[in-house]
Image (cartoon, rainbow, N blue to C red):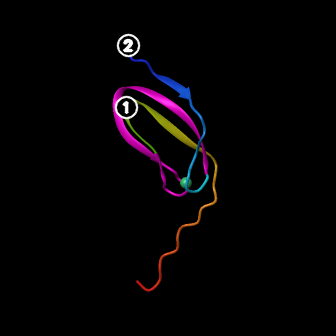
Amino acid sequence: MATWDIQKGEDMTCPQCGSVYSVKYHQVPVKDVDSAACVVCGHEMARWKSTRYPIIELKTRGEWHEPEATPGE
Ligand SMILES: [Zn+2]
């Protein structure tokens, strides 16, 4: 019998843009390899290789401006 469990985790803040994410941990019977990135700036928030992985959900959008392309390349 497979057990599915969702556990509430601590909030996570993106170190690059300051966006706040709520985190839930999902337990699955099969090992999964994946990662989750900040949807605002693309910073990698988590990477895992296990049966327990975080699901992050944007709560507060941080201040982030795409770096401008360097002219004259
Ligand atoms: Zn970010």
> Is residue 62 rendered to the left or right of residue 4?
right
What crowding class fits label 1: few (fewer than 14 Cα within 10 Å), some (14-19), or many (20 or more)? some
Question: Could you say which disc has been placed on residue 1 in the image?
Answer: 2
Residue in view at x 47 percent, y 29 percent: 26
Question: Could you say which disc has been placed on residue 3 in the image?
Answer: none
Q: Does residue 31 belong to the magenta stretch?
A: yes
Please determine whether, in this image, residue 53 is positioned above or below residue 63: above
Indicate the position of residue 71 as horizontal and vertical percent values.
47, 83
Identify the amino acid type marked 1: Ser
Please determine whether, in this image, residue 8 is positioned above or below residue 40: above
Q: Quadrant of ligand 1?
A: bottom right
Q: Does residue 18 belong to the magenta stretch?
A: no
What crowding class fits label 2: few (fewer than 14 Cα within 10 Å), some (14-19), or many (20 or more)? few
- Quarter of the N terminus within the rendering: top left
At mark 1, the secondary structure is: strand
Which label lies toward us, 1 or 2? 1
Residue in view at x 57 percent, y 31 percent: 9
Q: Which residue is mark 1?
A: 50
Identify the amino acid type marked 2: Met
Residue in view at x 52 percent, y 70 percent: 67
Separation of residues labelled 1 and 2 (CA atoms): 19 Å
Of labels 1 and 2, earlier in sequence is 2
> Is residue 35 rendered to the left or right of residue 40?
left
* Image quarter of residue 59: top right
Which is more toward the observer, 28 or 73?
Answer: 73
Marks 2 and 1: in contact by CB < 8 Å?
A: no
Indicate the position of residue 5 as horizontal and vertical percent values.
49, 22
Q: Which residues are magenta?
A: 19-45
Indicate the position of residue 53 as horizontal and vertical percent values.
44, 34
At mark 2, the secondary structure is: loop
- Quarter of the C terminus within the rendering: bottom left
Residue in view at x 54 percent, y 33 percent: 24
